[in-house]
Image (spheres, rainbow, N blue to C red):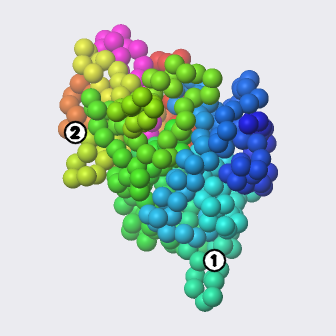
Amino acid sequence: MRLEPVLDDDPREILRGLRGALHGAGPALGLGLVHDLPAEVHAGTAVVITTSGSTGVPKSVVLSRDALTASALAVSGRIGDGAWLLALPVSYVAGMQVLVRSIVAGREPAWLTGAFTPQAFSATALKMVSTDHGSRIPTYTSLVPAQLSKLLDAAAHDSTVLAALRSFETILVGGQAIAAVTLERAEAAGVRVVRTYGSTETSGGCVYDGRPLRGVAVRIADGEVQVSGPTLADGYLGDSAATEAAFLREGAGSDGAGTRWYRTGDAGIIENDILRVRGRIDNVIVSGGINVSLDRVERVVRTVPGLESAVVVGVSDERWGEASVVVVPRSEALRRSESTQLEAARAAVADEIGAHARPTRLLLVDDIATLPSGKPDRETIRAAVAALH
């Protein structure tokens, strides 16, 4: 099967190409940071998404028609069927899946034009309100936490934005951990949010509010979250070693069948049948001879008022070997109380994790560097902090 790289993020063109790829009538699509990919892929492939991820290492993930369709059907089975609004880059799996769900449901999606702003989002969302034989058609969208926070900030003083947020049957929020205070703000505002967990390798979100979608299984092996089910990618294009390392097969017989498990690289636990992700296994520093999970520190720091959007990175430290630094967008409130906020963050981390995990600095920046997916670009942030440090 031919692979056709898509260099333009025009949703109309990608929607048209996806229809052909999903129905087997057109070539597979190459989305994202496509670099020298082969011209041919195996039959059944619908999309190859090349993403740098938070580590900056490009990976070309092969997603089949069956995996994408299984994901779309599982999502509609969990939250219902309706019309979707695309508010994320279509080269990002969560954005691309909005189009896939629309195709599978037989509905035309809506999408934003230009930059993401609360006003543009609201105008598009409210235009989607429609009925079918007298019944309102439910609407859905997918966002990253930073987008939801921006919308909630605007909704606090703009009734149109609030009405737009409330118009959705469900808003899926994923891509990274969402601060508890943001969820509380959404609930208080009457906004229906579902937290999603997944990755490109699982065709996007496959665990909703801690519970796997239909057909998906989750386990913890040696502290790592592992996922199986029909939504798994086929592997990494042109990299059999990486595929074998990330995708395990158990119980395989002579025919090669068996259960495939994807190693997420995330630490987690399952409590009362609910998956709780603790952060990346490899996002750890050694400070004073003690391992410190930066993801865990970041979650605690984000509970401090004013630091909900903070990113925590590790840098070299003469005294401790490595130490964590809190990076947060600049604001008038923070400028006036920078030392107070740092002490509040240090106290919260000491209370929740221990004194050894306390961040050493709080750095104000004009903007948090992000990847096209909306996730913090941790490599860029870390390099900038290291240069200042």
Secondary structure of residue under mark 1: loop
| Label located before the other in sequence (2 or 1) | 1
Q: Which residues are magenta?
A: 307-326
Mark 1 closeness class: few <14, some 14–19, many ≥20 residues within 10 Å: some
Residue indicated by mark 1: 129
User: Can residue 33 be seen?
Assistant: yes
Q: Residue at x 39, y 66 (%)?
A: 187
**Image quadrant for the N terminus?**
top right
Question: What secondary structure prevails in the magenta region?
Answer: strand
The amino acid on which the numbered mark 2 sits, given as a three-letter code, is: Glu
Q: Residue at x 64, y 33 (%)?
A: 50
Residue indicated by mark 2: 352
Left or right relative to 270: residue 128: right
Residue 16 higher or lower than 164, as above or below: above
Q: Residue at x 63, y 55 (%)?
A: 100
Measured in 3D between alpha carbons, the distance from the residue under mark 2 to the one under mark 1, in whole angstroms, is 44 Å
The amino acid on which the numbered mark 1 sits, given as a three-letter code, is: Val
Q: What is the x, y in percent for residue 146? A: 52, 49
Left or right relative to 11: residue 151: left
Which mark's residue is nearer the viewer, 2 or 1? Answer: 1
Which of the 4 image quadrants contains residue 194?
Answer: bottom left
Q: What is the x, y in percent for residue 226? A: 36, 37
Secondary structure of residue under mark 2: helix
* Residue 313 is one of the magenta-drawn residues: yes
Q: What is the x, y in percent for residue 34? A: 71, 30
Q: What is the x, y in percent for residue 36? A: 74, 23
Residue 365 higher or lower than 15, as above or below: above
Which of the 4 image quadrants contains residue 246?
Answer: top left
